[in-house]
Image (cartoon, grey):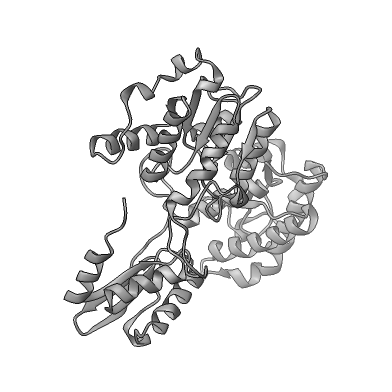
Amino acid sequence: EHFDFQKLAEYGEKGVLCLMSDSTNAEVPGHTPSERSVFPNLDRAFAQANGRLLVTTFASSVHRVNMLLELAQKHGRSVAVVGRSMLNVIAHARNLGYMSCPDDLFVPLKQARSLPPEKVMVLTTGSQGEPMAALTRIANQSHRQVKIQDGDTVIFSANPIPGNTIAVVNTIDKLMAQGAKVLYGRRAGLHVSGDGAQEDQKLMIAMTRPKFFLPVHGEHRMLVKHSETAQSMGIPAENMVVIDNGDIIELTPDGIAKTGTVSSGIELMDSSRVGVVEERTLRDRQHLAEEGLVTISAAIDWTGKLMVPPVVHLRGVVSAVATSQIEKWVADTIERGAQDKWGEYSQPLANGQVDVDWDRLQGHLESALRRLLRRELKSNPLLLFLIQKPSSSAVQPTELPTAKPRSSRGPSSRRKASSVVAS
């Protein structure tokens, strides 16, 4: 079915205010080959396959899927469709008349397993190595109904989208390791792009003759290149804008301008379904996964000294240092840091008591502890530091007996302090 160029040109005659044009192949010179140009190469691949065929492509590419069904019928192969999106596209396309193939071309996957391999084509999703797609699960040997067997030929009638290359290559490697022959890549001629190249973009601009131009769908460099192509076709630079995701565009008969932005991008939902995970929370989770967590709880009295040794817990932290040594370093750092800043963060009151800025003290000690962990553990774990403050009813400095050193506190006093930390 050929594109209606005449109808498009008629719109250009009537007047097009703005053309929003796909920029994916803006850096590619020439024309994009016709979709039909892959037919001979696919036909040859079908003819040379002696065993079962597994073919993957974009489920949304109706013309390509129809071509594969046509070839399966030509070569006497029954088709088993695997993958929900592929099943849905074929069903809707047939209902709308975009695919014409007999009902008996299709067989359930269970029935296909009982047919001779050379009489079967498995049409599947997973051309981009998507983790849950059917072909990926087949490659991972986790698909319950389809297993790779000797003599299988797998055809990738699609090229990797930028960003998916590693996933696709991993899938191909796993299929080959199981004994399948895999046909893939641009040299095989089994795929053509669905996006127009530079000359196609020029043709679109020439036919529509828009007053304003908005390059869309592509990386930023592609949008810039497409805008340069439009300028070469006579559209003034002031009549176009290069945009990013989330940009707000105001278009009037007299002008086009970027007027603001809205929040856009991928949002992560928490497994509890209560809402979107904020960026700060996501960073903390990533940090926790990579470096682990250290929690430190310290009870400090009204003189800035530790009432009991601090409680230190390491979770997911890889270290060759003994925990007892880390606890000693932590205690020394807290004691020294508190004493150094106690005169700055505490203020004697008229009644003989002391007012302490615990928030500033905690911030100072947190910074010192982070430096300690980076220096001694050679890592940067997430730190959760808590100061257990003395209660308001605790003995104030002026009431402390000066004759007794801190080490003379009895066991009962130490147990009491420990219970405060635990709470």
Residue 366 sits in quarter: bottom right
Tell me which residue sits at (44%, 44%) in the image: 58
Q: Which of 167 and 302 is in front in this view?
A: 167
Tally of marks: 0
Q: Quadrant of residue 129?
A: top right
Of residues 143 and 66, the one drawn nearer to the viewer in this rendering:
66
Residue 384 in view (yes/no): no
The percent position of residue 149, horizontal first and vertical second, equals 63, 22
Q: For the view shown, which residue lies furthest in the left direction?
A: 14
Q: Position of residue 215 (x, y in %)?
A: 38, 71
In the rendered image, which quarter contains the C terminus?
top right
Q: In this orientation, which residue lies closer to the viewer: 283 or 391?
A: 283
Q: Can residue 16 be seen in this view?
A: yes
Residue 342 drawn at (x, y percent):
65, 67
Image height of 120 relative to 32, above or below: above
Q: In this view, does 20 lie to the left or right of 252?
A: right
